[in-house]
Image: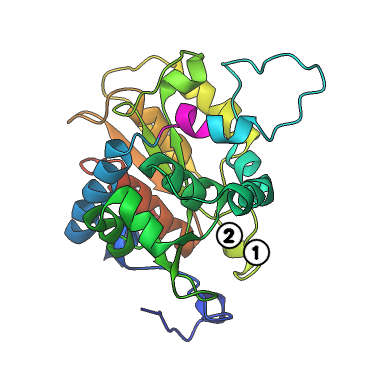
């Protein structure tokens, strides 16, 4: 499924669609007010994908363990359990993980590792291996949601369309343990998106993003408050602020604003994936 358009900024480049409008990215659009909200189909697909991630315990603490062995620690001391790693850190060690897989294979692999390989490290996984680890229904749910596709380089593999960073407010407070139910899941581009126009790229979760998110994690909620995320990109700051306050109620609103149409569809995907619908919209 490839979009076609007369706008050069939204055209197909090297066979890669500049803006995905299917799956969790599908939006109901008010053209007059330029308001984007997840379609009913996106909401349903987002819930299914969210259930897949939670079922296989896709959480930052678990994924971090796959990264630690490849982190150079000059002090020789054990890495702090409170240490946070950005999405870039995972992607930057993809070659180390790929080499480890080449040497040791993936004969016995669980769902968490497959999800981490696909959505954090950006490594293609054999479809049969992924199906064995996740189950056919869960793998199909991620493909239908527009988060996975068949690899163009090797038809037997699946690859992630986007990077997905799992995050709980407890991660930012340094508490230990895997917290699947408290997790948000944030869809962004991978750190290196050479096949898409740079001005349309959606920034991954870096350390600057995490610093700002830590302020949201400890902020107090006030009745009737409105959350505005300007230049929202993926919408991570606004969505996380709302998530840390246990969602939206009748007196609260979330507005995600950006001039980039591609950002609108990523914001829609993240609203759908995190189950935030009522009182929330993206504005271009």
Residue 201 - label:
2
Q: Which residue is mark 1?
A: 198
Inter-mark Cα distance, 2 to 1: 5 Å
For the N terminus, which image quadrant?
bottom left
Is 113 within the magenta? Answer: no
In the figure, 78 relative to 203: above or below? above
- Chief SS of the magenta region: helix
Q: Is residue 32 visible?
A: no
The picture places residue 21, in percent across and down from the top left corner, at 35, 68
In the figure, 36 relative to 75: above or below? below
Residue beneath the point at 70% across and 32% down: 71
Total residue callouts: 2
Region rendered in magenta: 59-64
Residue 204 shown left or right of residue 62 in the figure: right
Q: Are marks 2 and 1 in contact (CB under 8 Å)?
A: yes
Residue beneath the point at 62% across and 52% down: 98
Residue beneath the point at 19% across and 60% down: 41
How many residues crowd around disc 2 within 10 Å: few (fewer than 14), some, or many (20 or more)? many
Image quadrant of residue 57? Answer: top left
Residue farthest along the right direction in this orientation: 74
């Amino acid at each position: 499924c490839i979009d076609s358009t007369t706008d050069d900024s939204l055209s197909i480049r090297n066979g890669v669609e500049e803006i995905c409008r299917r799956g969790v990215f599908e939006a109901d659009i008010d053209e007059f007010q330029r308001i984007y909200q997840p379609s009913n189909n996106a909401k349903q697909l987002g819930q299914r994908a969210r259930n897949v991630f939670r079922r296989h315990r896709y959480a930052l603490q678990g994924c971090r363990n796959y990264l630690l062995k490849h982190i150079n620690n000059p002090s020789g001391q054990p890495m702090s359990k409170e240490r946070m790693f950005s999405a870039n850190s995972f992607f930057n060690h993809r070659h180390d993980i790929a080499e480890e897989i080449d040497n040791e294979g993936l004969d016995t692999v669980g769902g968490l590792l497959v999800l981490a390989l696909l959505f954090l490290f950006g490594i293609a996984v054999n479809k049969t291996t992924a199906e064995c680890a996740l189950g056919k229904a869960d793998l199909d749910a991620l493909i239908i949601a527009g988060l996975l596709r068949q690899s163009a380089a090797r038809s037997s593999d699946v690859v992630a369309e986007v990077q997905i960073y799992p995050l709980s407010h407890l991660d930012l407070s340094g508490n230990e343990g895997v917290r699947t139910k408290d997790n948000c899941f944030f869809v962004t581009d991978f750190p290196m998106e050479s096949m898409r126009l740079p001005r349309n790229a959606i920034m991954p979760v870096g350390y600057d993003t995490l610093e700002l998110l830590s302020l949201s994690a400890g902020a107090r909620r006030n009745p009737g408050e409105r959350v505005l995320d300007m230049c929202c990109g993926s919408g991570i700051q606004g969505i996380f602020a709302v998530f840390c306050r246990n969602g939206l109620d009748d007196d609260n609103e979330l507005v995600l604003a950006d001039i980039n149409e591609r950002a609108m569809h990523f914001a829609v995907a993240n609203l759908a994936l995190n189950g935030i619908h009522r009182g929330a919209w993206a504005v271009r």
